[in-house]
């Protein structure tokens, strides 16, 4: 869990600033590995809000923002936009959402993204969902995606693969060393990939979440819902439910 500073009005003074606790899952994998496709399924089943860094950047171009041209050029070249820009967009989207559970898709894309997000938001992901897929398969998918994206052409795709291997894989390795990575074989058909995703998201099952909330209410003290207590509550709830 981490917190996001919620400032409904930019002019609000500090005393009006509320902090909300949020759960974040980073969704990573190469271009075309199926991140967006699977995020839509996760939203349906587990009540997360999906924030795609790429979608937020594309929306920023469309909005006519002063950064628009710079972002457009970076995307065309398959380069990573400076963290400052992307993090602001992600923070704003989290603040504006009523939800407290977010899938952050396509971010962090490099070490700069990762370190800046950590130091600005202090948010640690619950885990990193990693879609593993071969370049051959990803290339096939990107070339038939048909979403009118300027970067889904063979020249830019090759550049994006290079950036993925050189800059994004080290981020996955960083989290892997901390046992945060949940690796999924993403080369399978959509439904089969989602079956594997479901196993990882089982703790977020709505009924189980509700039961956990009830369990917490029964606790005599005001426990912080950190991971340890979360696990304890889940275990106890499961024992009660399935005894
Ligand atoms: P990403 O967000 O990782 O770039 P997308 O979810 O946009 O990937 O998927 C890229 C393309 O591949 C889309 O056209 C999508 O419909 C298709 N696709 C996604 N997952 C699969 C899959 N498991 N098998 C075949 N095609 C897929
Ligand atoms: O994730 P998606 O494929 O939509 O990203 C498209 C492009 O958006 C990337 O190739 C990159 O140019 C840009 N991007 C970025 N920083 C991120 C995510 C995406 O610069 N964290
Ligand atoms: Mg996507």
Image: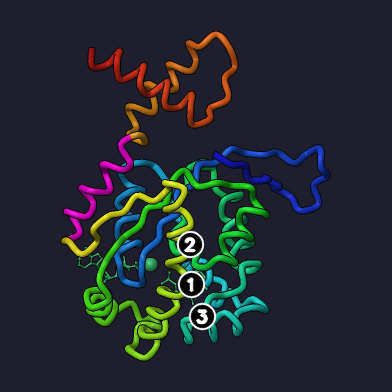
The answer to whether the residue bearing label 3 lies less than 8 angstroms from the nearest atom of ligand 2 is yes
Q: How many labels sit on residues?
A: 3
- Residue 243 lies in the magenta stretch: no
Answer few, some or many: residues within 10 Å of disc 1's Cα (few below 14, many 20 plus, some between 14 and 19). Answer: some
Q: Earlier in the sequence, mark 3 or mark 1?
A: 3
Secondary structure beneath dot 1 equals helix
Q: Could you say which is closer to the camera, residue 83 or residue 10? A: 83
Q: Which residue is mark 2?
A: 171
Q: Residue at x 64, y 62 (%)?
A: 88
Q: Which residue is mark 1?
A: 167
Mark 3 and mark 2: Cα distance apart in space: 16 Å
Q: Note whether 200 is above or below 136 in the view shown.
A: above
Secondary structure beneath dot 2 equals helix
Q: Could you say which is closer to the camera, residue 113 or residue 49? A: 113
- Residue 191 lies in the magenta stretch: yes
Residue 187 picture location, percent across and down: 20, 64
Q: Which residue is mark 3?
A: 79
Q: Which residues are magenta?
A: 189-202
* Residue furthest top as drawn: 220
Q: Magenta stretch mostly in which secondary structure?
A: helix
Secondary structure beneath dot 3 equals loop
Which quadrant is the N terminus positioned in? top right
Cβ atoms at labels 2 and 1 below 8 Å apart: yes
Q: Note whether 242 is above or below 103 in the view shown.
A: above
Tell me if residue 197 can be seen.
yes
Residue 10 picture location, percent across and down: 76, 53
Give the left or right position of residue 243, taking residue 162 as reference.
left
């Amino acid at each position: 869990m981490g917190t996001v500073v919620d400032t409904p009005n930019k002019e609000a003074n500090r005393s009006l600033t509320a902090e909300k606790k949020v759960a974040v899952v980073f969704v990573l994998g190469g271009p075309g590995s199926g991140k967006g496709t699977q995020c839509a399924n996760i939203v349906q089943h587990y009540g997360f809000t999906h924030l795609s860094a790429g979608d937020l950047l594309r929306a920023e171009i469309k909005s006519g923002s002063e950064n628009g041209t710079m972002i457009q050029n970076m995307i065309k070249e398959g380069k990573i936009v400076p963290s400052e820009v992307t993090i602001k967009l992600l923070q704003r989207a989290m603040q504006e959402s009523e939800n407290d559970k977010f899938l952050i898709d396509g971010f962090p894309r490099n070490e700069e993204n990762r370190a800046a997000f950590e130091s600005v938001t202090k948010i640690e992901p619950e885990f990193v969902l990693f879609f593993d897929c071969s370049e051959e398969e990803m290339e096939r998918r990107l070339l038939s995606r048909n979403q009118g994206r300027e970067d889904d052409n063979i020249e830019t795709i090759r550049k994006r693969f290079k950036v993925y291997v050189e800059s994004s894989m080290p981020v996955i390795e960083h989290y892997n060393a901390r046992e945060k990575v949940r690796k999924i074989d993403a080369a399978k058909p959509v439904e089969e990939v989602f079956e594997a995703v479901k196993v990882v998201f089982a703790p977020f099952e709505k009924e189980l979440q509700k039961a956990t909330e009830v369990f917490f209410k029964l606790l005599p003290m005001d426990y912080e819902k950190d991971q340890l207590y979360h696990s304890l509550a889940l275990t106890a709830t499961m024992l009660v439910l399935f005894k």
